[in-house]
Amino acid sequence: MLVKSEIKRIVSLQQKKYRNEHGLFFVEGKKTVQELLVSTIALHKIYCTNPEDFTVSAPFLEHITDAECKRISNLKTPNGVVGVFKKPAPQNIDFTDWIVVLDDVQDPGNLGTIIRLCDWFGMQHLVCSKNTVDCFNPKVLQATMGSIARVNIHYVDLVDFLKNTTVPIYGAFMDGKSVYETQLPTKGILVMGNEGNGISSNVEKFITQEISIPQFGEKTAESLNVATATAILLNEIRRG
């Protein structure tokens, strides 16, 4: 049976402040928990209504009731599994391949999808501005579908990060050179901007090449969703 203090701590992890304070985050769903279990991210505890689904033993596994699951879940319809994990320590950034950089992306769904795209296209490092939404936000984690286990995510001062790099820096702009006409190198940095404002002026001055995804229709949307644009650009990067 879950005690009141434990329920309170798990629920508090829905807020960034308490995730940082406890050094923990939580995910929901059997598949996502299982993917994290085989990653380098350390387990704190699994709470589930069907403990036979996991080979983890006590004290890292606790059988809970449906009612208890509902109290600690962030979902309208809980799926019976809540995994609490330790936030991973920062890793060194590897500049031998492409790196995706996010400049103040705010929507949890967009960040979660971009993490999943980095996983799909083999981008090991995702660098985020300090004002980008927290990657351990429950909505972000839900959208990653487990890819959070395979992508190293860094929160840094982008100006300091970009001014000290020696690889070419490409930025996504509406009026940049068509990516289909751009010869992309084997390593570099791809910067994606905020949903409403694009790449900030402080970051823009470090861009060595502005690229864009051309429009083809006569009546086109004002812009592409940042996650959709990231998918197209990463595909072009990997096409070589």
Image: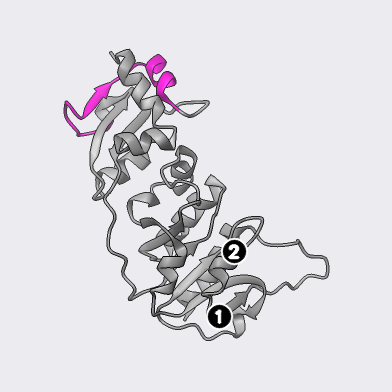
Depth check: give the residue in front, 212 or 122.
212
Residue 84: horizontal and vertical position, in percent?
Answer: 31, 34
Depth check: give the residue in front, 73 or 22.
22
In-image side of 201 versus 63 (left or right): right
Which residue is located at x 35 percent, y 39 percent?
20
In-image side of 114 versus 181 (left or right): left
Q: Give the range drawn in magenta.
A: 53-73
Image height check: is 72 above or below 100? above
Image height check: is 228 above or below 75? below
Residue 226: horizontal and vertical position, in percent?
Answer: 59, 59
Image height check: is 40 above or below 126? above
In-image side of 141 versus 175 (left or right): left
Q: Report crowding for label 1: few under 14, some 14 to 19, many 20 or more residues within 10 A (C-alpha).
A: some
Q: Report crowding for label 2: few under 14, some 14 to 19, many 20 or more residues within 10 A (C-alpha).
A: few
Q: What residue type is labelled 2?
A: Ser
Residue receiving disc 1: 209
Residue 152: horizontal and vertical position, in percent?
Answer: 34, 57
Q: Is residue 25 visible?
A: no
SS assignment at label 2? loop
Queried whether the magenta region covers residue 70, the answer comes back as yes
Looking at the rendered image, the quarter that the N terminus falls into is top left
Queried whether the magenta region covers residue 124, the answer comes back as no
Residue 15: horizontal and vertical position, in percent?
Answer: 44, 33
Which residue is located at x 51 percent, y 75 percent?
206
SS assignment at label 1? strand
- Tell me the tag on residue 200: 2
Which residue is located at x 82 percent, y 65 percent?
219
